[in-house]
Amino acid sequence: MLSISIICTGKLKESFWREACAEYAKRMGAYCSFKIIELPESKLPEKPNAAQINAALEQEAQRIFAGIPTGASSFALCIEGKPFSSEELADTINTCALNGQSKLAFIIGSSHGLAQSVKNAADYRISMSKMTFPHQLARVLLCEQLYRACSINAEGKYHK
């Protein structure tokens, strides 16, 4: 069975974000094993400099690497990634599954993004848009797109 994890830095503070993710997590149960792994953000001063941000990102990277399931294909969400249509994401997930890669890990960084080491280690880099989104909204959007991709692959009615 396909196993999809979202590994993200930071918690969803507002209930509406949590409820949206919970709804898609419930729907995903029809297609795969699905879980969201929340990791703590590194503490930074009010106005961090570039070195402080990079050090924090590397601390977060170590937690991210520890959270990726053994043998999983990893997908880093980053602005320099490749934009995927819903159909392309569905096809990539399907190709991974057909190639015996039954574990997929999608990685969302903190408000400062992801360490370069995480991006370099990822099997895929995905850009959700040229626009910038708060990481809480990015998580909801990713949940919806993963659900849509699974629905597309199952020839469901959700994607029109």
Image (cartoon, rainbow, N blue to C red):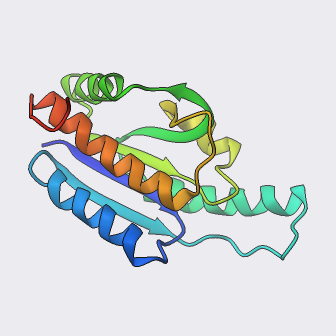
Question: Is the residue 144 above or below the residue 89 in the image?
Answer: below
Examine the image and state in which quarter residue 160 appears.
Answer: top left
Q: Tell me where residue 110 appears, x and y as whole percent.
A: 61, 60
> Is residue 102 among the parts visible in the rendering?
no
* Residue 140 in the image, given as x and y percentages of width and height: 40, 55
Near-viewer residue (141 or 105)? 141
Residue at point 18%, 42% (across, down):
2
Picture residue at 18% right of the left edge, 30% below the top:
152
Q: Depth check: 114 or 65 in front?
A: 114
14 sits left or right of 100 in the view: right
Horizontally, is 11 left or right of 159 in the view? right
Instruction: Look at 91% across and 61% down and name the residue there.
Output: 49
Query: Percent x, y for residue 120?
Result: 62, 34
Report whether residue 130 is seen.
Answer: yes
- Reply above or below: 157 against 141: above
- Give the quadrant of the N terminus: top left
Q: Residue at x 68, y 48 (%)?
A: 115
* Residue placed most toward the observer, 157 or 94: 157
Q: Quadrant of residue 97?
A: top left
Measuring from the top left, give residue 19's x and y in whole percent: 31, 70
Q: How many marks?
A: 0
Q: Quadrant of residue 25?
A: bottom left
Q: In the displayed structure, would residue 56 be above or below residue 157?
A: below
Residue at the far front in the pictured view: 160
Q: In this image, 7 relative to 3: left or right?
A: right
